[in-house]
Image (spheres, coloured by chain):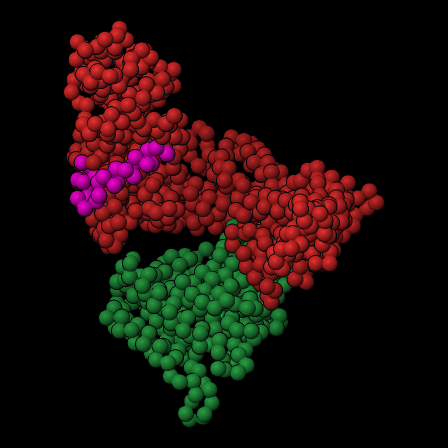
Chain colours: A red, B green
Amino acid sequence: MPDLLIELFSEEIPARMQARAAADLKKMITDGLVEAGLTYASAAAFATPRRLALSVEGLSARSQATREERKGPATTAPDKAVEGFLRSTGLTRDRLEIRAAGKGEAYFAVIETPGRDAAGIVAEVLEGTIRRFPWPKSMRWGTSSLRWVRPLHSILCLLVGDDGAEIVPVEVEGLRAGNATRGHRFMAPEPFSVTSFDDYEAKLKRAKVMLRPGEREEAIWHDATNMAFARGLEVVEDRGLLAEVAGLVEWPVVLMGPIGEDFLSLPPEVLRTSMKEHQKFFSVRNPGTGRIEGFVTVANIETADDGATILAGNGKVLAARLSDARFFWERDLAEAKAGMGAWAAANRDVTFHNRLGSQADKVARVAALAETIAPMVGADPGLARQAAEVAKLDLRSEMVGEFPELQGLMGRYYAGAAGLPAEVAAAAEEHYAPLGPSDEVPTAPVSVAVALADKIDTLAGFWAVDEKPTGSKDPFALRRAALGAIRLLLSNGLRLSLGGIFTLANGEADAADLLSFFHDRLKVHLRERGIRHDVIDACLAMPGADDLTLLVRRAESLQAVMGTEDGTNLVQGFKRANNILAQAEEKDGVEYSFGPDLKFAESDEEKALFAALDAAEARIAPAMEREDFAAAMEAMAGLRGPIDAFFEAVQVNAENDILRRNRLNLLNRIRIIVGRVADLTRIEG
Amino acid sequence: MADTPRSFQEIILRLQAYWAGQGCAVLQPYDMEVGAGTFHPATTLRSLGARPWAAAYVQPSRRPTDGRYGENPNRLQHYYQYQVIIKPSPPDLQELYLGSLAAIGIDAALHDIRFVEDDWESPTLGAWGLGWEVWCDGMEVSQFTYFQQVGGHDCAPVSGELTYGLERLAMYVLGVDHVMDMPFNDPDAPIPLTYGDVFRQTEEEYSRHNFDAASTDALLRHFEDAEAECARLLAVPATDPRTGKRIVMAHPAYDQCIKASHLFNLLDARGVISVTERQAYIGRVRALAKMCADAFVTTAAAGATEAA
């Protein structure tokens, strides 16, 4: 059972693409090998900035020969049919066999595929993989028509058996596979040949290349935390950055340096963002004060001066970057203290959407809406208005211009510097939340008011100009906005009638359509929380469905009841009642909506149902009144026994017309009373 | 290993000598206001078509919005780029590039040189390519791009383009913190001149001009004129009545495209272009660049054998 080693050596592969590329290489090659009839024991793929590598162990030396027989058309069939069969089998007519089949004779094809050596298969699969590799972005270079993420320089492809390593003969656009590779670009640039995966990995290490991304990450994290610890500091964890940095080096060398005193007054988020985005530095924190006091950079080379030149250079670049940041920060603070009027004015020149006016127009709408919503969420209307007016000002600040990801956070700092109330400053930061499905949801009332107003204004606005999401297209992230609003309402238990608020936000928006968009998003959201979509549908039909908090409480109660035996059986009984009634109404052309009369009840079961309905109604009405859905559902579920017993004992469509009508009217009472709790016709099963 | 240069101009001279030694035609700057070395027709137009090409040159470049009255240590509205363009891109272009760093005194054994993903796109030129920004000890010292498309045309063969931001690179090599303090000529020359001696006053003058004084009415008018002139030149029939030869005026038309692009940058600095208009202006310049590219690929310089 030979092992297979492949390396594709290129110019620097973008860090963000490496992990995916290694996985794709493994999948494409192993899938191809298996499809061609080979088996293997295990496979592992690796990436460094300059290479993708794959090791497959225990590959079969040859594929199995296969023999397949296929029956074709009868010998009397028209030529067309025979030609089609030849095409599908890839044979010529003289290769077909004629055998008895049924009453006559038919053509038979015997397709024999001989076993093939692994080398031939590997060569074919590798070439196909290289030509069809799914890079997110690929390019051509020189005069070659091959596409790769960056110029591809060499291919290493070895089959390693008991009697040594054999180069697999692959050639792609003039690149012929060999057994050689190169080490580190600067520390070990000479080519060397390898004889197996173990030999490959060991020689690479000697040539200053750590093949495994995980090993590079560990080395970086280990050295960084040790260095920081030695000085009583700690590295701020950032897994995304760690993975990226590990994709920028073949031989990580960790260096740590201080941040100049002049910059320590910058907000820690600014330091962290500037260092990460521009320099790909880790931040180093003083655990006592929480201040960011140093940086860790990861070089790709060991130098004679132990990195002194590199560290000095990096420190210098950082100082220039942080000078810029401090310049922005100081200018912004001056503007903040002056009342941020220039930013408000600048917002008038920024288009929010060409049919929805400027950013300033949007702010004015959000402010008005936030003020209206404020009392419903327990916020002070004046503060909510003020917060909305301030919340988008930082978009015009220099810092946010430089680091868009600091929007909101800078708003909080600047509102604070402007001497505005703490609630207003907090809302400037929090009103964007929640963005992702796992983001924390704001709870401070003023933040909630502005966050809701901002999202609802956006949605109602885009609904008014008919820019709704379609299929996979949602360029304005409206689904995210709706989910954000939903989570704000639910996790704060807010009681708002959305329909009215939509109309208030934008009179031209189709409020009913927007509400059904919210309901769709709500269903997706609740499904993730385990609530059945048919349960939600059963509640959507009830009054007050534009109050999502109420809707969800109703749905949760219904779901709980549906989980009980009484609940599921009640649905059966209810549906039976409903069906009988609907058929009778259709046949008779009338609605059985008169109250039934107890005096026509014959059997005990029928009388018991009368009593049970009276009792349930007496419990359901007040329970619904105080929105005690659990009690209402329980009362409703209590009908299960009497309804089942009734159907067991009583023939609804009796000979006697009076009895029949009375019983249909009784069924109608079931429909009415149950219908006050939920629309059980929507429940599946 | 090369010793450390002593002045801004020495770095330029060493780059010129190095790339001349690699067989590039050392061209002179294009005589028009451009935003970057890429706008030089030696890059934009010559990266089109099949004819091999290798050129290197300094290109004075203007970015009106980056003016800081000569006060910012790194930002200038007028600066120099060093540009290398080779078609087809040679297989050892990275090594050639690293050789150029060595030539200006950057020892790869002592510094941390990295190729970090940075794809290049010029919406105004309808051009894009893949490549890296090259980092030296955490500082971006060059842009390295394999052109894939220019003026809407696929590049075949592909050109390799190297762009060095000369001031920044030189400040790093010379260990200077403020661009204006950088020695322009040899510090021991009879009349030693700093970058500030040469450019501080012009940075002030142009900053004022770009931000406040340039006549927006005139700029708008010039933009319209350049746009119209570009289209008009390309619409003239290819056969020249005076010589009877086929003479497509791709370069004169492209000059108008360059003009329009620079005028747009000035209008942008004057703050009279709104966010929505911005895209429209960029689209107009791109349309000109595309027309020029369409015209150029029909000419002999692009390798077209017999024009249609």
**Magenta segment boundaries in residue numbering:** A500-524
Residue A7 lies, in percent from the top left, at: 67, 49
Could you tell me what secondary structure mostly forms the magenta stretch?
helix
The location of residue B219, given as percent across then percent down, is: 28, 71
| A343 vs A655, nearest the viewer | A655
Residue at x 72%, y 49% (from the top left corner): A99
Query: Which residue shows up at 46% across the image and 77% down it?
Result: B296
Asked if A463 appears above or below A535 in the picture, the reply is below
Q: Position of residue A323 (x, y in %)?
A: 40, 49
Residue A242 image point, x, y percent: 53, 40
| Image quadrant assignment for residue A544 | top left
In front here: B295 or A618?
Answer: A618
Left or right: A24, with A618 as reference point: right
Residue B160 lies, with reference to residue A451, above or below; the image says below
Number of callouts in the render?
A: 0
- Residue drawn at x 59%, y 49% is A49
The N terminus of chain A lies in quadrant: top right
Q: Toward the viewer: A239 or A566? A: A566
Residue A516 is one of the magenta-drawn residues:
yes
Res A428 quadrant in image: top left
The residue shown at (33%, 69%) is B263
The stretch drawn in magenta includes residue B219:
no
Would residue A238 be seen by someone viewing this image from the given angle? yes
